[in-house]
Amino acid sequence: MKTTIANVNQHLNETVTIGVWLHNKRSSGKIAFLQLRDGTGFIQGVVAKSAVSEEVFEQAKTITQESSLYITGTVVEDTRSPLGYELQVTDLEVIQEAEDYPITPKEHGTEFLMDHRHLWLRSKKQHAIMKVRNEIIRSTYEFFNNEGFVKVDPPILTGASAEGTTELFHTKYFDEDAYLSQSGQLYMEAAAMALGRVFSFGPTFRAEKSKTRRHLIEFWMIEPEMAFMDHEDSLKMQEEYVAFVVQSVLKNCKIELETLDRDTSKLENIQAPFPRITYDDAIQFLKDQGFNDIDWGDDFGAPHETAIAEAYDKPVFITHFPVEIKAFYMKPDPDNPNVALCADLIAPEGYGEIIGGSERIDDYELMAERYKEHDLDGPAYEWYLQLRKYGTVPHSGFGLGLERTVAWITGIEHIRETIPFPRLLNRLYP
Ligand code: 4AD
Ligand code: MG
């Protein structure tokens, strides 16, 4: 009976065959312990000399790391392993002997591992991170489907900038100039006017010359956009969404979080509502903490965000930033037009901003004014202005950076391990 490691629990005391790779092994005279993986999980195969043919025992003792094989054995309970089961091997058939697998169980440097990313993904830790990433994506679709959102796919090749012109990837679209999308937001606003509540999930590109543990050049963003929803409604949606994702990972990725040594007590209390602090109060808070390098009108750097986050044990919204340091489309606060109806959501434990969002300008005249101030003209922007002309409505939206969210939930240090093939300042391969 062919099965997978994830499904062995359905075959207790039965004999099964699984296609696997040899992750690691140790052996003594009469017994070999094979650490096997098949993508769905990890299991130990116990090969007792007395239980198999001489030839099979010899193969079990000499088989090399990352060799591929079909393994046959009886599924038995093993309370010591995270999976809860092991395999008492009766037979094995080698598919291919792997020679000199470069990533050995010893420690390797980061650059070496990054050069071998195509193989590094097979390691236990990387496997766990990718599984958590997948659960975040899965639960995102579940959440927004439950809330009546429609998934909409904005284009990647665009004629305009959504988030400022300094970080654009330029390319040619036949004879025209084009850019890789920094954000699908402008298109999602059009989609919200057609479908009400929409969300996108796709790659975005920032030609940012930052080399930090939080920045990727290519990253994936989830961008919901909601008609008839104001800033306050949007914050509620954001905290419900983030809490749902965290609780889903806690429920469905127990083995992975254990593999990653994640302190799950810090994730358990991630429940709505989240605390909020205004930009003004955040500046005052930082000054009181002894930060002399920040004044009203400045944007926060990583140390500022970390200091603010440390005051809370949940993600915290920083709201009402000065209009000048935020994007052109954000709606000014009617009670104080110097600040915008916007918020950044800062993750706990120093992981920085995971969401940026706002209510959008819905007034045609005000948006036309912003166009002048920001020199936005031509057909690339004309359509976006028209959304304010034909049945404009209050609307809000936000963008969650998937990789920063993965880094926070898995508790890993650097964003480069949160995406299968990271695009970094100095890395386009593999
Ligand atoms: O704050 P940002 O730039 O917001 C937008 O792009 C809006 N248009 C979203 C919207 O309202 N629809 O980016 C949103 C999030 C950030 O909070 C961060 O999590 C992530 O995207 N992000 C990055 N992640 C990795 N590497 C980078 N270089 C990132 N830049 C932004
Ligand atoms: Mg932002």
Image (cartoon, grey):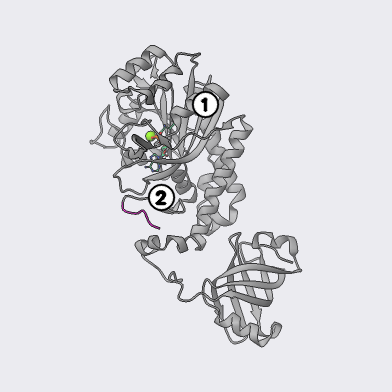
Q: Which circle marks residue 213 in the picture? A: none
Q: Residue at x 74, y 64 (%)?
A: 11
Q: Quadrant of residue 329?
A: top left
Question: Ligand 1 within 8 A of label 2's CB?
Answer: yes
Of residues 24 and 64, the one nearer the viewer is 64
Label 1 residue SS: helix
Label 2 residue SS: helix
Of residues 268 and 236, the one nearer the viewer is 236
Few, some or many C-alpha atoms within 10 Å of disc 1 (few <14, some 14-19, many ≥20)? many
Of residues 129 and 162, the one nearer the viewer is 162
Highlighted range, magenta: 426-430
Q: Which circle marks residue 191 in the picture? A: 1
Q: Residue at x 38, y 50 (%)?
A: 423
- In the rendered image, residue 102 lying in the magenta stretch gets the answer no
Q: Is residue 196 visible?
A: no
Q: Dot 2 corresponds to which residue? A: 415
In the rendered structure, which disc, 1 or 2, sits on the residue that comes first in sequence? Answer: 1
At which x and y percent is residue 185?
45, 30
Q: Residue furthest top?
A: 365
365 up-or-down from 14: above or below? above
Magenta span: predominant SS is loop
Q: Residue at x 60, y 68 (%)?
A: 20
Few, some or many C-alpha atoms within 10 Å of disc 2 (few <14, some 14-19, many ≥20)? many
Q: Is residue 382 left or right of residue 34?
A: left
Q: Is residue 403 left or right of residue 17?
A: left
Of residues 273 and 302, the one nearer the viewer is 302
Q: Residue at x 54, y 44 (%)?
A: 136
